[in-house]
Image: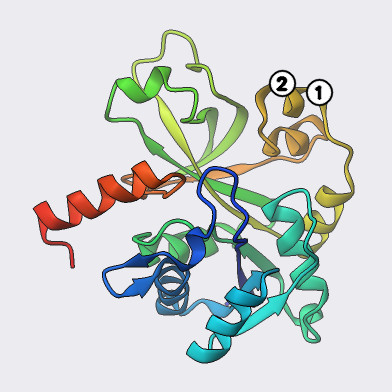
Amino acid sequence: MTKTLIIIPVRMASTRFPGKPLISIHRKTMIERVWEIAVKAKIGDVYVACCDKEVERFLIKKKIKYIFTKKNLKSGTDRVYNAYNKIKTRNDYKLIINLQGDMPFFNYLYLRKFQKLFKQKKIQMATMASPILNKRKILDRNVVKIAMTTYKNNIHRALYFSRSPIPFGANKYFEHVGVYAYTPQTLKDFVKMKVSKLEEFEKLEQLRALENKVEIFVTLINKAPISIDTRGDLKELLKSIKIKGIL
C-alpha cells in the first residue's frame, strides 16, 4: 500500500465564516468530525495543519496530531505544503491528500477509493467530481464545474475547471469536489509555480497545474459532500440533520 499522509488545512480567519473550524455540530466541532473521517479511512497518517493558537489548544486537548504552520499563506495548498515540510518523517510518504476542513460528513470510503488511483504510475495529481443532480447548481458560479475525458476504466482526466457551465451542451454536468492528492514532488512543484492567467480569471488554483502541463486525474463519487462555507450553509445542514435524523 502507498505510504499516505492526510493533511487537513484549517484557519479561523475565514472570510465568509470566521471561526468555522471550531463551530459545534451536534456536540462535536467541525474539525473534530473531519479528523475522525480521515482516521476512519485507515489509509495513512492524519495531521491537522493550523495557524491559530485557539485551534492548537483544542487539538492538544483532544489529542489530535497537528502541525502549526505559518499564519499568512496564500491558500490551503500552501498550508498543506508548509505542514508537510515540518514533518520529520516526510520522506517516507509517497502520497499526500489535502482534505478540506469544512466537510463534516465526507464519506471516508471515498478516501480509500482515491488512494487506489495512484496504483497507476502515470498519476501524479488527482481530485474528485460528482454528478450535478440539481439543475440550479449548473448556473451557480459558486459550484465549480469540470470538463473531463475518460483515461481508462473509471479513471478520468480533467481538461478544464470553470464556474461557468462546461462543457457546453452536455447532457450531464459534473461538480468539482475540492479534495486533492499529489505525489510529494508534484505538490512541491505546484506551490512554486506562478499564479496563472486562467487561475486569476476563474479564481481556481487548480488551473495553475493544468496551465503548467500537470495532468489532473479524477475519481468520480456518487454525491458531493456538504461543504460549510457560510453560516447559511451551517443552518441548512442542521436543518437537514433534524429532518433526516443523521445524528
- Given residues 45 and 199, the one toward you in this image is 199
Where does residue 7 sit, x and y in percent of width and height? 62, 69
Residue 62 visible in the shown view: yes
191 with respect to 117 (left or right): right
Up the image or down, 7 lies above or below 210; here it is below
Cβ atoms under marks 1 and 2 closer than 8 Å: yes
Q: Residue at x 40, y 78 (%)?
A: 40
**How busy is the neighbourhood of tag 1: few (under 14 within 10 Å), some, or many (20 plus)?**
few
**Quadrant of the drawing holding the N terminus:** bottom right
Q: How is the image coloured?
A: rainbow
**Quadrant of the drawing holding the C terminus:** bottom left
Outermost residue on the top side: it is 169
Where does residue 184 sit, x and y in percent of width and height? 77, 64
Where, by quadrant of the figure, is residue 187 drawn?
Answer: bottom right
Give the residue number, with chain letter if any, for mark 1. 197
Q: Which amino acid does label 2 sit on?
A: Phe
Gap between marks 1 and 2, in whole Å?
6 Å
